[in-house]
Amino acid sequence: MSVHTWAKEYLQRGMEAAGTEGYEPALALRALLSAVVEASKGYRSPADLAQELQFLADNLDDDRDYSFMRP
């Protein structure tokens, strides 16, 4: 199992637990993101973390057509 598969499965279990507690999905995800960013500060520089978050934010649109992907 890859670390990305593990993370997705772990997140799914966490979201199910949050739902059981009555938390709205968007609120639970926001809290998880905040906790992950806070924990990441102990392993990565703020600039590195900000760069990755910006990359992820810039690539949220699954339907976006990137010029380097065109045949």
Image (cartoon, helix red, strand yellow):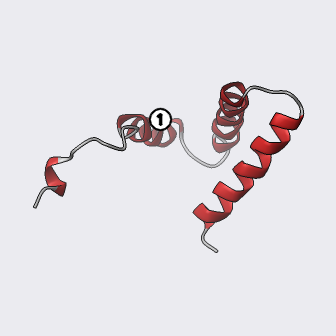
**Residue 24 drawn at (x, y percent):** 74, 26
* Residue to which mark 1 is pinned: 50
**Residue 3 drawn at (x, y percent):** 62, 65
In this rendered view, identify the residue nearer to me: 70 or 2.
Answer: 70
Q: How many marks?
A: 1
SS class, disc 1 = helix
Vertically, is 4 above or below 56? Answer: below
Q: Residue at x 39, y 41 (%)?
A: 55
**Residue at the farthest bottom position:** 1
**Residue 30 drawn at (x, y percent):** 66, 28
Amino acid on which the number 1 mark rests in the picture: Ala
Vertically, is 51 above or below 25? Answer: below
* Location of the N terminus (image quadrant): bottom right
Quarter of the rendering containing residue 27: top right
Quarter of the rendering containing residue 29: top right
* Location of the C terminus (image quadrant): bottom left
| 4 to the left or right of 19 | left
In this rendered view, identify the residue nearer to me: 1 or 45.
Answer: 1
Crowding at mark 1 (Cα within 10 Å: few <14, some 14-19, many 20+): few
**Residue at the farthest right position:** 21
**Residue at the farthest left position:** 71
Q: Residue at x 88, y 36 (%)?
A: 20
**Residue 69 drawn at (x, y percent):** 18, 56
| 40 to the left or right of 65 | right
Q: Residue at x 31, y 42 (%)?
A: 63
Q: Residue at x 70, y 31 (%)?
A: 25
Quarter of the rendering containing residue 21: top right
